[in-house]
């Protein structure tokens, strides 16, 4: 029987599971007629970020997802879901295109964090993340982000500045991994379970703090039912968002983030 301590780390393990659905699964099972678009028009195409046009029922949308890959070969090609700057710039290019044509943006986030290699830093990783955060806050079209696995630090936040953020119940959202946190605080990665409990990184924690609007239950049996749930829920969100003006969307998005961390007296 599991004790309460360590329960958060069980969520971490679930979010990292090799059998877990990845971004590409959500794109092809929730939407139809997906057309992938490539490149950031500056440097290269980043396979760790997928994006393009699709239909949700009969309505056109822009879909963007971080993609980890499912086997060794695809994980290496996708850089294990750790985007380079060009991945975030590709995502931003697609968001700006969606704004131009009045399409809602739906993002699926599953990344341990942005890639921290030398090349990524030389090409402006921090700037790319900051530009996405700034631009998404001012984007005059509806944005929904769904955390479907790991939501790691700024690498996740660069695709999660949205009108609403949802999390699957076994997803996590944190400024740092439990292992890195344990190493920084105690020089002992063996205390990762303790760090996970302290980080409050589970979906229920995020919901309690007002960081996310919804926690989506993952079916224990027939896990593929999650696609039907998301399809209907996103369709309802899109319909409600379409009824709002761009100014009201921007105001609501601004207030959403301003309210985080506010102390109630």
Image (tube, grey):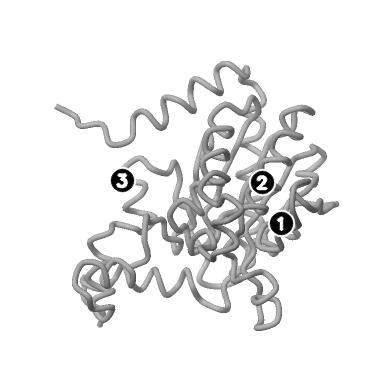
Residue 179: give x, y in percent of width and height. Answer: 33, 72
- Label annotation for residue 50: 1
Q: Looking at the picture, tell me which residue is in the foreground, 244 or 200.
A: 200
Badge 2: few (under 14), some or many (20 or more) residues near its Cα, within 10 Å? many
| Horizontal relation, residue 114 to residue 100: left or right | left
Front in this rendered view, residue 23 or 122: 122
Residue pictured at 62% horizontal, 69% vertical: 68
In the image, residue 129 above or below residue 116: above
Report helix, strand or loop for mark 1: strand
Residue 171 drawn at (x, y percent): 46, 61
Q: Secondary structure at mark 2?
A: helix
- The crowd level at tag 1 (other Cα within 10 Å; few <14, some 14-19, many 20+) is many
Q: Is residue 211 left or right of residue 251?
A: left
Q: Residues within 10 Å of mark 3 (few under 14, many from 20)?
A: few
Marker disc for residue 89: 2
State the residue position of label 3.
208
Judged by depth in the image, the label closer to the viewer, 1 or 3, is 1
Nearest to N terminus: mark 1 or mark 3 = 1
Q: Give coordinates of residue 19: x percent, y percent.
A: 58, 78
Q: Residue at x 33, y 69 (%)?
A: 180
Q: CA distance from mark 1 to mark 3?
A: 30 Å
């Amino acid at each position: 029987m599991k004790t309460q301590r360590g329960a958060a780390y069980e969520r971490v393990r679930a979010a990292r599971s090799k059998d877990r659905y990845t971004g590409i699964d959500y794109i092809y099972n929730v939407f139809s007629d997906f057309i992938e678009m490539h490149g950031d028009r500056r440097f290269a195409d980043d396979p760790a970020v997928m994006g393009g046009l699709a239909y949700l029922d009969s309505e056109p949308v822009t879909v963007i997802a971080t993609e980890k890959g499912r086997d060794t070969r695809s994980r290496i090609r996708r850089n294990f879901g750790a985007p380079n700057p060009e991945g975030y710039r590709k995502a931003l290019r697609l968001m700006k295109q969606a704004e131009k044509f009045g399409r809602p943006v739906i993002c699926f986030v599953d990344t341990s964090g942005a890639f921290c290699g030398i090349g990524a830093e030389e090409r402006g990783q921090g700037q790319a993340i900051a530009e996405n955060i700034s631009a998404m806050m001012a984007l005059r079209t509806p944005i929904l982000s769904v955390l479907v696995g790991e939501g790691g630090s700024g690498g996740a936040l660069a695709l999660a500045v949205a009108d609403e953020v949802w999390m699957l119940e076994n997803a996590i959202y944190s400024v740092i991994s439990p292992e890195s946190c344990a190493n920084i605080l105690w020089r002992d990665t063996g205390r990762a379970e303790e760090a996970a409990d302290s980080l409050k990184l589970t979906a229920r924690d995020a919901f309690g703090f007002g960081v996310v609007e919804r926690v989506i239950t993952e079916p224990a049996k027939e896990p593929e039912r999650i696609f039907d749930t998301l399809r209907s829920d996103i369709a309802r969100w899109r319909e409600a968002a379409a009824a709002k003006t761009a100014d009201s969307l921007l105001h609501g998005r601004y207030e959403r983030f301003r309210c985080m961390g506010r102390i109630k007296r």
